[in-house]
Image (cartoon, rainbow, N blue to C red):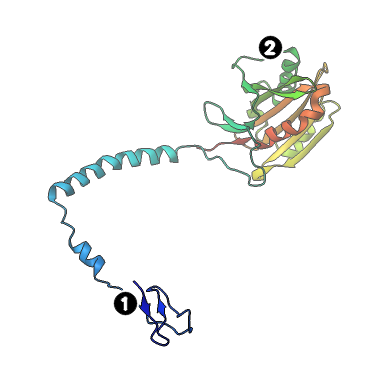
Amino acid sequence: MSKQCENCGQNVLPGDAICWQCGARLPRRRQSKMAEPAAAANLPPLSLRTIALLGAVLLLLLPLLFFFTGRLAGQPLVRTVPNKPIPPNWQPVTDTAQRFTFNVPPRWEPQPAALPAEPAVVAVLDQLAELGGTETTLVYHGIMEKFIGDEYVPAYLLLAESPALSQLPPEELQQQAAPVFTNPQQLELITGDFDQTRLNVIWTPPPGPLRCQLHLLLPGETAVFFAICTPNESFPPFSSDIQTVLDSYQQLSP
């Protein structure tokens, strides 16, 4: 329904604030403020039966709310690094006891709890035990693969723990590691994400078919060996993925 401008008499629309003909300001139409309260006043009051039903539903939902809140509170805390997002198609893995987590590429396969069968991988474990002592135990291992050239090349992931090294100062641990990892390409202390001190080692274990990179993480209740080994000639194209996996490791706190 149209109306007329009081200044020039031109027809204008009810919602217009200014006359398009002469530019005069148009008076605003007052809206009724009684419509909504009137509509609300017409709502019927809740019956006692409805109120009782709503109360019963609330009582049923409260235990479920407390249950799920407790479960979420008991989950380990996984921290993230904003400048290091998970690469596409990678996924985090966690051990069954939820003690640690790290990220792995798509072609990843965890291995049984038994020791690896490959002699070269066993030789790596022997070197870790030489540094970590007789209490060094393998807690997790697996195989990841990368397409290099015209075939998939494996990399062996080993995660072991040593209580004997947990109390050593980092500099002393570096000195003890030097004669164990003979002719290393790298042997240095670094500060990783979350200000965690790591001994970073790249070396070729005897008899020589593999090259490995190790992060020895400390301090903590136990020192953690996190090593990844791949065939010697495949290490350079694999090194970026290896570094990404090693950097993603974090211990979980309940």
Percent from the top left, x then y, of residue 74?
45, 38
Q: Residues within 10 Å of mark 1 (few under 14, many from 20)?
A: few
| Quarter occupied by residue 218 | top right
Q: Residue at x 32, y 38 (%)?
A: 64
Return the residue at label 1.
30
Residue 180 in sight from this viewpoint: no
Q: Residue furthest front?
A: 10
Q: Is residue 13 above or below residue 215?
A: below
Task: Report the Cα–Cα distance between label 2 and label 1.
Answer: 87 Å
Return the residue at label 2.
117
Percent from the top left, x then y, of residue 160?
65, 25
* Side of 90 relative to 53 (left or right): right
* Side of 9 relative to 225 (left or right): left
**Quick one: 236 or 6, which is closer to the camera?**
6
Q: Residue at x 73, y 34 (%)?
A: 243
Find numbered disc 2 in the image and state the secondary structure of the residue it sits on.
Answer: loop
What amino acid does circle 2 point to? Ala
Percent from the top left, x then y, of residue 249?
64, 35
Q: Is residue 123 above or below residue 78?
A: above
Percent from the top left, x then y, of residue 251?
59, 36
What amino acid does circle 1 point to? Arg
Q: Residue furthest bottom?
A: 7
Q: Residues within 10 Å of mark 2 (few under 14, many from 20)?
A: few
Give the number of the mark in front: 2 or 1: 1
Q: Residue at x 13, y 46 (%)?
A: 49
| Quarter occupied by residue 194 | top right
Q: Residue at x 34, y 77 (%)?
A: 29
Q: Are marks 2 and 1 in contact (CB under 8 Å)?
A: no
Find numbered disc 1 in the image and state the secondary structure of the residue it sits on.
Answer: loop
**Quick one: 41 or 1, which is closer to the camera?**
1
